[in-house]
Every structure is written in structure tokens, then in C-alpha cells.
Amino acid sequence: MAHTGTGFFDRKGHFFKTAREATVSDLAGLLGQIGEGESLAPGIAYMLLERRAEIERLFAEHDAMLEEEAALKAARSAETRDNIAKLPSRPAH
């Protein structure tokens, strides 16, 4: 007898029984071929999904460091501008 079921598709349109499998497939596709022979991308994709919270925390810390770095550069740039004396402009001949 026929019955209904739930399935998930990755971005390429391949069918998977679970959302996890479809997501791992998409992540592996983003990573591309890793290593010689059979790609390591599916295993790496699985680990990325498993450690998602830790990875997102690292990216949040990275973003905060980038903001801090930009603020430091802006502060240094402002200090440099304060130390520069402007010369009087010369009349055009």
C-alpha cells in the first residue's frame, strides 16, 4: 500500500531522508573537492554542522576583533591628522 513521507532536497535537487543529510550535502558542495581521490568535503561538512555553535561563536569573536581593529585604525588616523600642519595655500600664477 502506498504511503506518504517527508524528504528534503539539497540545492542540486538531490533527495535525502533527513534535513541533516541535505544540509551536509549542500555544505560539501560549497567546500568542493578536498584532497586527492575521494573528497574529504562530506566529512568536513558533517563536522561543521556538528560544531556549528562553536564555529558561530568563533565567527562572532572574529567580527568583534575586526570591529576593534577598524576602530584602532580610525583612532590612529585621527591622531595623525592632528599632528599635520597645513601649509598656507599658494596663489595660482
Image: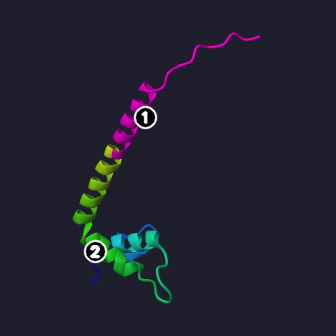
Q: Which is nearer the eye, 58 or 91?
A: 91
Q: Which is nearer the eye, 3 or 63?
A: 63
Q: For the magenta stretch, what is the residue range?
A: 69-93
At numbered mark 2, what does the secondary structure look like: helix, strand or loop? loop
Residue plotted at (44% across, 71% down): 31
83 is higher (above) or lower (below) than 64 = above
Q: Quadrant of residue 27?
A: bottom left
Residue kind at label 2, given as amino acid type: Thr
Q: Quadrant of the N terminus?
A: bottom left
Where is residue 46 shown, x and y percent of the image? Answer: 31, 76
Q: Which residue is situated farthest in the right direction here? A: 93
Q: Is residue 90 visible to the viewer in this orientation of the structure?
A: yes
Residue kind at label 1, given as amino acid type: Ser
Where is residue 89 shown, x and y percent of the image? Answer: 62, 14
Residue 77: which disc?
1
Q: Is residue 21 visible to the viewer in this orientation of the structure?
A: no
Sooner in the amino-acid sequence: mark 2 or mark 1? 2
At numbered mark 1, what does the secondary structure look like: helix, strand or loop? helix
92 is higher (above) or lower (below) than 43 = above
Query: Can you identify the residue that label 2 sits on?
Result: 4
Residue plotted at (28% across, 74% down): 4
Quick one: label 2, few (<14), some, or many (20+) residues within 10 Å?
few
